[in-house]
Image (cartoon, rainbow, N blue to C red):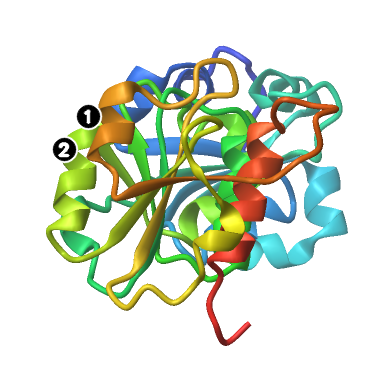
Amino acid sequence: MEKITSRENAKIKYACRLASSGAFRRSEGKFLAEGRKLCPELCRGAALETLFCTEAALEKCPELAGLPGEHYLVEDHVADKLADVGTHQGVFGIFRTPVHTLDETKTGGRYLALEQDPGNVGTLLRSAAAFGFDGVLLSDGCASVFAPKTLRASMGAAVRVPVMEVGAMPAAIAALRAKNITCLAAALYQSQPLSAARPGYPGGVCVVIGSEGQGLTEETIAACSGTVRIPMTDRLESLNAGIAGSILLWHFREESL
């Protein structure tokens, strides 16, 4: 296995650029992930092209040698440059980004739609996978699913659930409703309580969530089939987007769970 000893190595610079730039990730169709558990987990839904690992990491996890792609040993100071966090595990992988489109949505499916960069995107992806959802739609401006922080939070769910970048959300909602999918916007005001939105929509359902600060745009709310809210006491006005979204996803989970 070839060893990389310089932080200025072209492959290392390329990997670092994938980690730091969303525009570069999109143009290259690749992303960088790190972690002894995360990299093998991502191999279940994304193609691994290049694996970097330290000797210590390979000794702890010899099964890493069986992963696909090109493999390189890196010295600790090189691994430090690749790392997004201060304390790392010495394992990094460059993966090809899975591509999914709105055409893959189907009548009867369950979907999550995120607009205006809601917090905790990784957490919501993880919840969508846990509760059997068929896909996640991201509007323009949402956090990159394949940014290092989001990947860690999603624990591999970023490649377990199809993620679709759909541009303007109102148009995407219209496309879902044309397939008889009921689209429900999470909104605090002029909305029905969640208990009134019973699971079991025959055409499928899409839960639409916006940012904690601004919520959904008026255009997106108007495009939806209806609105829902989570009943709460008057001690708080709203929940964290990751928590609220997870409650909604649980409510509309697969009936077999």
Query: Dot 2: few (<14), some (14–19), or many (≥20) neighbours within 10 Å?
Result: some
Would you place residue 254 above or below residue 64 in this image? below
**Residue at mark 2 to residue at mark 1: CA–CA distance:** 6 Å
Q: Nearer the viewer, residue 91 or 21?
A: 21
Instruction: Look at 59% across and 46% down and name the residue there.
Output: 124
- The quadrant where residue 217 appears: top left
The amino acid sitting under disc 1 is Ala
Q: Nearer the viewer, residue 20 or 172?
A: 172
Instruction: Look at 80% across and 30% down and name the residue there.
Output: 234
Quarter holding the C terminus? bottom right
- Is residue 246 at least partly visible in the picture? yes
Q: How far across and how far down the image is residue 135, in percent? A: 39, 58
Would you place residue 165 above or below residue 206 in this image? above
Instruction: Look at 46% across and 60% down and name the residue there.
Output: 161
Residue labelled with disc 1: 168
- Is residue 156 at least partly visible in the picture? no
Query: Dot 1: few (<14), some (14–19), or many (≥20) neighbours within 10 Å?
Result: some
Tag 1, which secondary structure?
Answer: loop
The amino acid sitting under disc 2 is Ala
Q: How far across and how far down the image is residue 41, in percent? A: 62, 61
Q: Are marks 2 and 1 in contact (CB under 8 Å)?
A: yes
Residue labelled with disc 2: 171
